[in-house]
Image (spheres, rainbow, N blue to C red):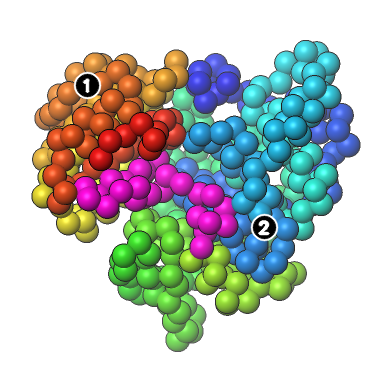
């Protein structure tokens, strides 16, 4: 499993996915879809789009990865996880083929998701790319809209060391005549998308050129964002249940996708607002600036790469607290030094690791962090580290858990004493 082992489990090839899907009747050809790629923000964007489609009354599939607690989180319809029985039955049904072609965990999961969506006759499915785009298992679909949220450094060992190389992999989801929305652009990556869209005769929209964030404010556990249209005097306010400031960028992407979808789907402004206001309840999204306790304010955040941590440090500048306690664990194949160099030196750190082989040892993380003047102690398990932070924190302090999806996924509320 890539989640546990990393690059050794990654298969950059669509052959197995095609064989698996052929064996179960090509389910991906039986439902409409939206395809979402990008370095950061693709999970939030996928969930917001799914919530909006659900709010409009459509039976909506949602395929995302990785999961936090339960494998079935990856495959949902209208926020409900795939049944355990289907997971078992599907795996049993294709077991002979699994033994013959030895597909990866990702490849099996994608075929499983597509089969569930087809069987349940969804109106539309939002499909999040697992890794990259061009050779990702999900890239056998022909969606109604392709989405690329942004490009930054992550998985360089698999996708390339330069932003242009990473952009080429993400641009691999652009298909003949399928409209594509790019969320954030950089001077070095923009030409990659323009060229690929031209080759595929795909209408291309840069979301950050169509609209801009005119204003924002945080209102309790919501983010109010005023969005202005770049080509008219139109200005609208949106109420987001996802409170991370970085969600304002994702919102621009979502709004552009919705505008394109309106040609074929009935989507009202009320549907958009309802979806954005209730995305957690509608889709079960967690771990994105997720406040789990008030005093001390305790936040779970799955950010784990350079760009994600930059967004987190910007968010911290807008937070009020006396002391900051950061519980952090990382996996070995991330650019650890880049992340550590961005983290605030004034915080007290609780270095830990998730219970997976891919996790960086907590004492090694402590040693690396010391080079950047980050001070703290190390703990052998996530909940031990978080409990130590809770014990040390005062009501006016803040606790942030970050560095890895797997660290956030191991937080066990029932075992913590506040």
- Cα separation, mark 2 vs mark 1, equals 45 Å
Q: Residue at x 60, y 64 (%)?
A: 52
Disc marking residue 87: none
**Is the residue marked by circle 2 packed among few (<14), some (14-19), or many (20+) residues within 10 Å?**
many
Q: Identify whether 12 is placed above or below 134.
A: above
**Is the residue marked by circle 1 packed among few (<14), some (14-19), or many (20+) residues within 10 Å?**
many
Towards the viewer: 167 or 330? 330
Instruction: Classify residue 194 as left or right of residue 95.
Output: left
Q: Residue at x 61, y 39 (%)?
A: 74
Q: Identify whether 216 is placed above or below 27.
A: below
Instruction: Classify residue 51 as left or right of residue 412.
Output: right
SS label for mark 2: strand
Q: Residue at x 11, y 40 (%)?
A: 346
Of pointers 2 and 1, the one earlier in the residue sequence: 2
Q: Residue at x 55, y 16 (%)?
A: 8
Instruction: Classify residue 151 as left or right of residue 343.
Output: right
Q: Which residues are magenta?
A: 278-304
Towards the viewer: 30 or 275? 275
Number of numbered discs on residues: 2
Q: Residue furthest bottom?
A: 233
Residue where numbered disc 1 is placed: 378
- Residue 199 in the image: x percent, y percent? 68, 51
**Can see residue 45?**
no
Q: Identify whether 185 is placed above or below 127.
A: below
Towards the viewer: 362 or 141? 362
| Residue 305 lies in the magenta-colored region | no
- Residue 55 in the image: x percent, y percent? 63, 66
Disc marking residue 145: 2
SS label for mark 1: strand
| Residue 302 lies in the magenta-colored region | yes
């Amino acid at each position: 499993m890539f989640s546990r082992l990393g690059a050794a489990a990654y298969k950059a090839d669509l052959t197995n996915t095609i064989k698996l899907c052929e064996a179960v009747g090509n389910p991906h050809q039986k439902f409409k879809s939206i395809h979402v790629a990008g370095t950061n923000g693709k999970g939030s964007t996928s969930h917001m789009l799914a919530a909006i489609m659900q709010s409009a009354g459509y039976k909506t599939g949602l395929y995302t990865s990785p999961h936090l607690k339960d494998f079935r989180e990856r495959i949902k319809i209208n926020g409900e996880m795939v049944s355990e029985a289907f997971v078992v039955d599907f795996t049993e049904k294709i077991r002979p083929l699994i033994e013959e072609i030895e597909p990866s965990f990702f490849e099996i999961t994608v075929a499983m998701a597509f089969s569930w969506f087809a069987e349940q006759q969804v109106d539309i499915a939002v499909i999040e790319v697992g890794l990259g785009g061009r050779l990702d298992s999900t890239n056998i679909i022909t969606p109604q809209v392709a989405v690329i949220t942004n490009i930054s450094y992550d998985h360089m060992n698999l996708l390339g060391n330069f932003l242009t190389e990473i952009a080429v992999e993400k641009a691999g989801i652009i298909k003949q005549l399928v409209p594509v929305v790019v969320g954030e652009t950089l001077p070095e990556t923009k030409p990659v998308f323009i060229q690929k869209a031209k080759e595929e005769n795909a209408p291309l929209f840069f979301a950050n050129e169509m609209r801009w964030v005119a204003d924002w404010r945080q209102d309790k556990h919501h983010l109010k964002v005023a969005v202005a249209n770049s080509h008219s005097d139109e200005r609208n306010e949106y109420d987001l249940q996802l409170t991370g400031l970085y969600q304002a960028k994702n919102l621009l992407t979502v709004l552009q996708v919705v505008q394109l979808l309106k040609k074929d789907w009935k989507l009202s402004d009320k549907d958009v607002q309802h979806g954005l206001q209730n995305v957690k309840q509608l889709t079960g999204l967690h771990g994105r600036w997720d406040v789990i306790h008030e005093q001390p304010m305790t936040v779970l955040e799955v950010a784990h790469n350079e760009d994600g941590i930059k967004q987190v440090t910007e968010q911290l500048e807008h937070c009020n607290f006396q002391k900051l306690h950061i519980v952090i664990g990382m996996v070995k194949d991330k650019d650890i030094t880049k992340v550590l160099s961005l983290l605030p030196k004034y915080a007290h750190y609780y270095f830990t690791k998730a219970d997976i082989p891919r996790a960086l040892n907590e004492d090694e993380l402590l040693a690396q962090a010391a080079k950047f003047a980050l001070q703290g102690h190390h703990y052998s398990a996530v909940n031990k580290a978080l409990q130590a932070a809770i014990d040390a924190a005062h009501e006016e302090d803040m606790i942030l858990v970050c560095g890895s999806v797997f660290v956030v996924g191991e937080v066990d509320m029932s075992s913590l004493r506040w």
